Amino acid sequence: MFALDPFTVLFTTTLTCAVLAAAMVSVHLSFRREVAGVGHWACGLAAMVGAGVLFLLRGKLPDALALPVANVCLTWGIGLSMIGTRRFFGEPGGWAIFHAAWTLELAAILYWLLVEPNFPHRAAAFSFIVSVFYLDQLRLVWRHRVAHFTSWFFGALLALQCLNTVSRGVAALFMEPDAANLLRSSALANVYLAIANFMALLITVAFLMLATRKLQQILEQRSTHDPLTGVLNRRGFLQFFGRVRARQQRSDSPLSLMAIDLDHFKAINDQYGHAQGDKVLMQVAAVIMRSARQCDVVARFGGEEFVVLMPDTTLAHAQQLAQRIQALLRDSLQAGTPSCTVSIGIAGQHLVSESLDSLLARADHALYRAKANGRNRTEIAGPAPLAA
Ligand SMILES: Nc1nc2c(ncn2[C@@H]2O[C@H](COP(=O)(O)OP(=O)(O)OP(=O)(O)O)[C@@H](O)[C@H]2O)c(=O)[nH]1
C-alpha cells in the first residue's frame, strides 16, 4: 500500500492554494465588473492558506488554539468559495449558511477537543458541515448548467469532493477511531488526502475555466454589439448576414433590408444635450427590436442610423414593419423625452447574386429620398441594376 507523508501533502496543498489565491486576485482586479465571485474565491483560498499554515505548525502552538482556528479558517475558505460560486451565477445570499456553518464547526471542535475529547466526532462534524458548501455549489451548477465541458467538469469535481468528504465523515463515525485521522497513514486517510490535495487545485482551476469562458462570451458580445443600444454593430451584422445569405441561397426566398435614420437628431442633441440624445437612441432601438421578428437582424451602423435585415420578407411585408416602427415610435413617447421621428428606406433583394454593398446602397438611396421628401416617411428602392 502506498503511503503519503501527510505533512508534505499539506505543505504542497498550502503552497498551491497560495499560488491560486494570487491568480484569483489578479483575475478579480482585472475583471471584477465582468465576472462576479472571483474575489470571494481569492479570499477563500487565502483562508485555506491560513488554515494550512496553522496545521503545519501543529506541535509548536497549543492544540487548544491552533486546531479551532485552523478548522474555522478552513470552513471559511470553503464557505467563501460557495459564496463566490453563488455570485458568479448571479445568486445573492448564502451568508446565513456560511455563518451558521462556521459557528457550528467552532462549537463542535471546542466541545470535542476541550470538553469531551473525541477525534472521530470532530472529523465527522467538519466533514458533514463542509459537504453542505459543496452540495450548494453542485445545486447551482445543475440549475445553471450549459452543454459545455467547463460546466460538467466543475460539477463532476464538486460531486467527487462531496462524496470524498461525506465518506470521511461516515468513516470517522463507523470505522475504527483512527481511520479518518489524516496524520496516521491509514488507507482511508491516504485516499482522502490524495483526493483532497488534487481537489483544492482542480476545483479552483475548474472555476477559473468557467470564469474564462464567461469572459470570452462577454468579449465576443462586446465585439459584435453596440454598447449603447445593445443591438448588433456593423461587425456583428456582417457575421449574421453571411448566415442569412447562405440560408436564403438554399431556399431562394425573398430578403429585404431597411435603413432607418433619425430625423433632425442633431437638433435633439443641441436642444436637450447628448445624454438625452443617447436616451432617444436607446428608445428607438428598443422600438425597432420590439417591432422586428425574432429572425430579423437589427444593427446600429454608427451615429443615428439603424439597419434591419429581414429574411423571408417581401417588400410589402417590410413596408408593414416600417409603418409599425413609425406608429410605435409615435405611441411610445414618454413624458419628458424629446419627440423623435425616423425616415426609412427599404430595398428588396431580387437577385441572389446582389452584394450586401449594393443592397445597402439602394436602401440608403431610398432613405435619402425619404429625407428629401419631408422625413418621417418610408421610401422603397428601385430594382438592382443587373450588373450588381
Ligand atoms: N447623443 C448621441 N448623438 C450622436 C451619437 N452618434 C452621433 N450622434 C449625433 O447625431 C447627429 C447627426 O446629425 P446629422 O447627420 O446632421 O443628422 P440629423 O440632424 O439627424 O439630420 P437628418 O438626418 O438630415 O434628419 C450629430 O449631431 C452627431 O453628433 C451618439 O451615439 N449619441
Image: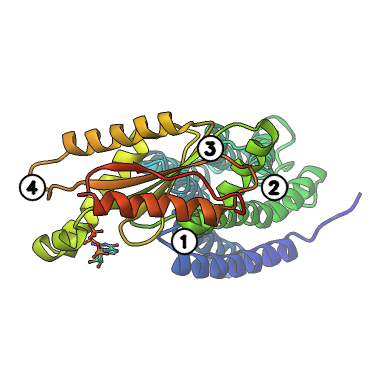
Residue in the image at 8% along x and 42% along y: 335
Residue in the image at 50% along x and 62% along y: 42
Q: Earlier in the sequence, mark 1 or mark 2?
A: 1
Q: CA distance from mark 3 to mark 2?
A: 72 Å
Q: CA distance from mark 1 to mark 2?
A: 27 Å
Residue 155 image label: none
In this orientation, which residue lies closer to the viewer: 136 or 34? 34
Report the amino acid beneath label 1: Cys
Near mark 2 (Cα within 10 A), the count class, few <14, some 14-19 or many ≥20, is some
Which residue is tagged 1?
Answer: 43
Q: CA distance from mark 4 to mark 3?
A: 38 Å
Q: Secondary structure at mark 4?
A: loop
* 194, above or below 290, in the image: below
Say whether residue 71 is visible: no
Query: Quick check: marks 1 and 4 in contact, CB under 8 Å?
Result: no
Which residue is tagged 3?
Answer: 255
Q: Secondary structure at mark 2?
A: loop
Question: CB at mark 3 closer than 8 A to ligand 1?
Answer: no
Q: Secondary structure at mark 1?
A: helix
Say whether residue 284 is visible: yes
Q: Secondary structure at mark 3?
A: strand
Q: CA distance from mark 4 to mark 2?
A: 71 Å
Which residue is tagged 4?
Answer: 336
Residue in the image at 46% along x and 61% along y: 43
Which residue is tagged 2?
Answer: 181
Q: Earlier in the sequence, mark 1 or mark 4?
A: 1
Report the amino acid beneath label 2: Asn
State ligand 1's quadrant. Answer: bottom left
